[in-house]
Each structure stands twice: as C-alpha cells, then as structure tokens.
C-alpha cells in the first residue's frame, strides 16, 4: 500500500486524492489550518511548515511527498527531500516561488518574457519605471498569487502610491517591476514529465481572468498549430532544465502572435481542471503517476471543454447538472469573498454545442458576463 503525502490541503490536494483512489493509493495531507478541504477525504496533520516535529511525523508516514501549495518554504521542502522522495524537486519550487529567478531562467532558456527589473528601493522603482515605461505592474517577488501583491502603475505619477502599497515588502519578499502586456489572449500549457523524462502536454488552454483570478478556461484553445507547438516547446525546455517531475503549468500572454511567459506554477493548475472530464487522463492522476514513477496516461482530449470557476460562493448546481455534458465540483469550503469554492466543467463535441450550453448555464445562473468571452471565442472566426 503506497501513501502519498501532500503538502497543502486545499482543493488541489482534494482532487488529487480523489483521482488517486482508483490506483489504490492512500494519502496524508499536511496543512497549517484544521479545516483545509482535503481533510474531508484524507487524514491530515495540522502544523506549521517550519515545525520539524510535524514534518518529521509527515515524513515517517508517507512513501513520497508532493505539493498542492507552491509557497511551502523551500527549506522545509528540502528538509523533507533529505529524508524521503519529494517531487517536484525543491529546486523547481524555489525558482517558481521567486518571480525574478523564474523570469531570469525563462530568459536564459530563450523563452520570451515581458520586460522586467528588480526593485529594492524607491529610487530603483523610479529608475525601473523610467526604463520600462508605463503602464507597468509592481509585484511582490514571492508569496503573490491570483493577482495579490500587485499594483498597476498607469503613469509615473502612480509611483508613490505603488510604493505605499508594496514598498514595505521590498526587504521581505522583494519586488519586481514588469512591463504591462496588452495581450490579445492568455494561454496556458499544462504538462507532465515523468521520473524517466517522458514529457506530455494537454492541448493548449485559453484562460480569462477577472481581478487577477481565473474565471474561465477553454480547451483546446482556438489557435494555429504552430503557436501551440511553440508553447509546448517552451514548456518542454523548462521541464528539462529543471529536471522537473510531475504536472506544472506555464502561463503565457499572447501579444501580436508572440508568446510571452508570465509564470510557472509547479503543481497541478486551475487551468487544467477541465482535464478531469475533458481528457483521457486528468492532470491530477498524471501528476500522481509521474511522482510514483508509473506509466503516464494519455492526455488526449475528449471533445471540447470549458471550466467555469466559482469564486466566493457556490451557485445553484442544477443549471449545470441539467446539461448532458455538465460536471459539478464543490470543494466543501465555506463561502468567503474572493475564495475559490468550486468549479463546473462543461463538455461538448462541437464548438457550437459548447457555446449553446454555456449560454444556457450563464442565463440560468445570471452569469452571462462570465461565459460571454468563451462563447465569443467559440463562435469567432
Ligand atoms: P499573476 O499573478 O502574475 O499570474 O497575474 C494574475 C493576472 O494578472 C494575469 O493572469 C494577467 O491577467 C494579469 N497580469 C499579470 N502580469 C501582467 C503583465 N505583466 N501584463 C498584463 N497583465 C498582467
């Protein structure tokens, strides 16, 4: 009997545990809070990431460890890796945790990125704004996610407000200034690499964000094959450079037909949730297969799929359950503003069928705005 340890007990760990059940796997989750939603499906250790007693107990009860949460301190991940197999390796985690290290690696690998500059002081912020021009975005280097820890600078006059908002973090988590990319679309590659180096990707996904948080994903993205091949090549280069094991997502901006890398998520990713029903093998199960050294499953799609995120509170399930291709995911979390509490995946065999289903669901749930860009992408030329 194999037990997989998961650091972080949110919805990603929960879906991973669900996908691992058919493989006969057991799970142990570690989180800092007792009500983490994966705890509804797996035994859990509650403890601080730096608590060596808790980490030690975790290590003694699992065969291999992985993550649902990328901000587990890299030193804690390394402490575990000195005792048990940990995938992805702590080095990949450390790079993905630091926007500066991540973008520097992208650039070294020849993967285009938005313009960026490190910012350590107010003077450096002014110099960086002068260098990059406006609009631009000041971001924390570490511990930022879902648009948190970001300040949009529309003109040089916004520098003082940006510094007021984030300056105190220059000496703690560090800051980076990025050029604002006026992209046509956002895309992501969700990919998996096995312990033996085998590499697979799911079809390219198009994503829509609201206030920095993912709102909807569509797969396959409507794009020409050459662009998809470039995206896959970037992802492969990155995975090989990091000797990565497991699933990851590479988030990309597409501007004037050119792909610019935004960030690497060293874990299963929200833009890959559609793979549960929309592909032969889900990102969650392939992550487990990779981490355990098992053969990877096919990433072939079954038709088209759109995922809609439920943020803050769950809508009425029936609108989705009523649809032939409708799939419901309630993470069992308490409703709270801005919190990801669930998602739905709608699957169909043709773009027109999917667009129709989305419109119907959007109408019944009064979420026309959420489905509108996806419907437009499906019906556009
Ligand atoms: P992040 O946390 O870096 O993934 O940012 C969240 C979202 O903010 C992205 O998915 C984009 O929609 C937007 N964003 C982040 N960085 C930039 C940028 N440099 N230019 C334009 N939009 C951005």
Image (cartoon, grey):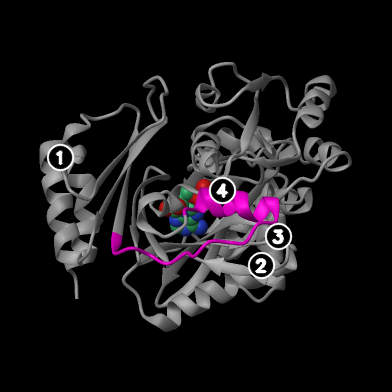
Gap in angstroms between the C-alphas marked 3 and 2: 8 Å
Rendered view: 371 above or below 54: below
Gap in angstroms between the C-alphas marked 1 and 2: 41 Å
Q: Secondary structure at mark 4?
A: strand
Residue at the disc numbered 2: 238
Q: Earlier in the sequence, mark 1 or mark 2?
A: 2
Judging depth in this view, the residue of 100 and 297 nearest the camera is: 297
Q: Is mark 4 within 8 Å of ligand 1?
A: no
Residue at the disc numbered 3: 244
Q: Given this view, does label 3 or label 1 mark the residue nearer the observer?
A: 1
Q: Earlier in the sequence, mark 2 or mark 4?
A: 4
Q: Given this view, does label 2 or label 4 mark the residue nearer the observer?
A: 2
State which quarter of the image contains the C terminus: bottom left
Residue 22 position in % (x across, y down): 51, 43
* Highlighted magenta segment, given as a residue range: 282-304
Q: Given this view, does label 4 or label 3 mark the residue nearer the observer?
A: 3
Residue 204 included in the magenta stretch of the image: no
Position of residue 208 in the picture relative to residue 296 (left or right): left
């Amino acid at each position: 009997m194999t037990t997989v340890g998961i650091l972080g007990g949110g919805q990603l760990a929960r879906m991973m545990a669900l996908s691992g059940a058919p493989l006969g796997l057991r799970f142990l989750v570690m989180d800092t809070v007792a009500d983490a939603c994966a705890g509804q499906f797996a035994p859990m250790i509650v403890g601080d990431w730096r608590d060596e007693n808790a980490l030690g107990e975790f290590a003694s009860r699992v065969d291999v460890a992985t993550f649902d949460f990328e901000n587990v301190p890299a030193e804690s991940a390394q402490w575990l890796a000195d005792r048990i197999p940990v995938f992805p390796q702590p080095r990949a985690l450390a790079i993905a945790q630091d926007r500066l290290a991540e973008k520097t690696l992208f650039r070294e690998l020849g993967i285009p990125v938005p313009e960026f500059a490190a910012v350590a002081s107010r003077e450096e912020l002014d110099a960086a704004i002068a260098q990059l021009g406006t609009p631009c975005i000041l971001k924390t280097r570490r511990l930022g996610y879902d648009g948190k820890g970001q300040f949009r600078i529309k003109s040089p006059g916004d520098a003082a407000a940006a510094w007021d908002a984030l300056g105190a973090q220059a000496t703690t988590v560090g800051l980076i200034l990025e050029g604002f990319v006026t992209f046509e679309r956002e895309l992501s590659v969700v990919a998996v690499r096995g312990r033996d180096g085998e590499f697979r990707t799911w079809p390219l996904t198009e994503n829509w964000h609201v206030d920095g948080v993912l709102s909807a994903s569509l797969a396959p993205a409507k794009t020409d094959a050459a662009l998809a091949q470039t995206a896959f090549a970037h992802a492969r280069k990155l995975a090989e450079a990091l000797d990565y094991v497991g699933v990851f997502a590479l988030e990309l901006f597409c501007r004037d037909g050119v792909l610019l890398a935004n960030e690497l998520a060293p874990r299963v990713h929200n833009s890959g949730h559609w793979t549960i029903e929309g592909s032969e093998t889900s990102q969650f199960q392939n992550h487990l297969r990779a981490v355990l050294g098992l053969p990877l499953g096919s990433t072939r799609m079954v038709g088209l799929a759109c995922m809609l995120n439920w943020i803050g509170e769950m809508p009425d399930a029936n609108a989705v359950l009523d649809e032939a291709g409708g799939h419901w995911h309630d993470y069992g979390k308490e409703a709270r503003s801005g919190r990801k509490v669930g998602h739905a995946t709608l699957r169909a065999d043709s773009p027109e069928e999917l667009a129709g289903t989305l419109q119907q669901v959007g109408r019944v749930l009064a979420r026309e705005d959420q489905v509108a860009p996806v419907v437009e992408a499906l019906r556009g030329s």
